[in-house]
Image: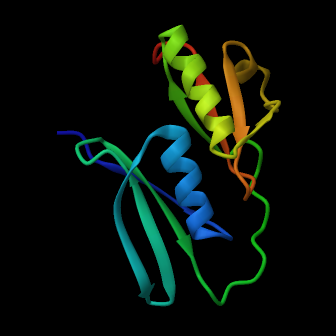
């Protein structure tokens, strides 16, 4: 059995990030916590999926540092129609289209940035 993966990211606005990723990537809210050792958070994913995303907010924290443009989540969608539909959902969810710093992701993919500066690539190919 393969291990499950959790990708945890801080956010300046927990509700905004949860909404964007739920709508843009069609993820379900799997859980939520409030004031757990000073942190609030929400987990998103598929209940039976091998990964989920966790967004956390520490109310006492100041301004977040901007992440590297190479801090990417990459999703592979080989079907062209499903890929195009997902790219459109990302824009409707509030992500903005950006040019990737790595030209590889521009060939066959679209890179999106959330309000905290984290990037998501939707690539129109099979897992290599």
| Residue 29 or residue 2, whichever sits in front | 29
Query: What residue is rendered at 55% in x and 27% in y?
Result: 86
Q: Is residue 43 left or right of residue 65?
A: left
Res. 27 image quadrant: top left
Specify the color scheme.
Answer: rainbow
Query: What residue is rendered at 62% in x and 27% in y?
Result: 87
The quadrant of the rendering that contains the N terminus is: top left
Q: Is residue 103 left or right of residue 2?
A: right
Question: Residue 66 location, x and y as percent?
Answer: 79, 60
Query: What residue is rendered at 71% in x and 37% in y?
Result: 112
Question: Residue 60 location, x and y as percent?
Answer: 65, 90
Does residue 63 lie above or below 36 as drawn?
Answer: above
Question: Residue 51 location, x and y as percent?
Answer: 36, 46
Q: Which residue is farthest top?
A: 80
Query: What residue is rendered at 59% in x and 82% in y?
Result: 58
Question: Residue 40 location, x and y as percent?
Answer: 49, 79
């Amino acid at each position: 059995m393969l291990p499950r993966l959790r990708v945890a990211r801080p956010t300046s606005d927990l509700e905004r990030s949860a909404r964007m990723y739920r709508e843009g990537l069609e993820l379900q809210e799997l859980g939520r916590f409030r004031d757990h050792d000073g942190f609030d958070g929400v987990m998103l994913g598929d209940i039976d999926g091998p990964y989920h995303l966790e967004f956390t907010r520490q109310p006492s924290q100041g301004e977040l540092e901007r992440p590297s443009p190479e801090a990417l989540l990459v999703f592979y969608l080989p079907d062209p129609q499903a890929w195009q539909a997902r790219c459109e959902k990302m824009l409707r969810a509030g992500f903005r289209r950006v040019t990737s710093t790595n030209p590889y992701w521009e060939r066959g993919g679209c890179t999106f940035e959330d309000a905290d500066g984290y990037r998501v690539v939707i690539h129109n190919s099979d897992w290599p």
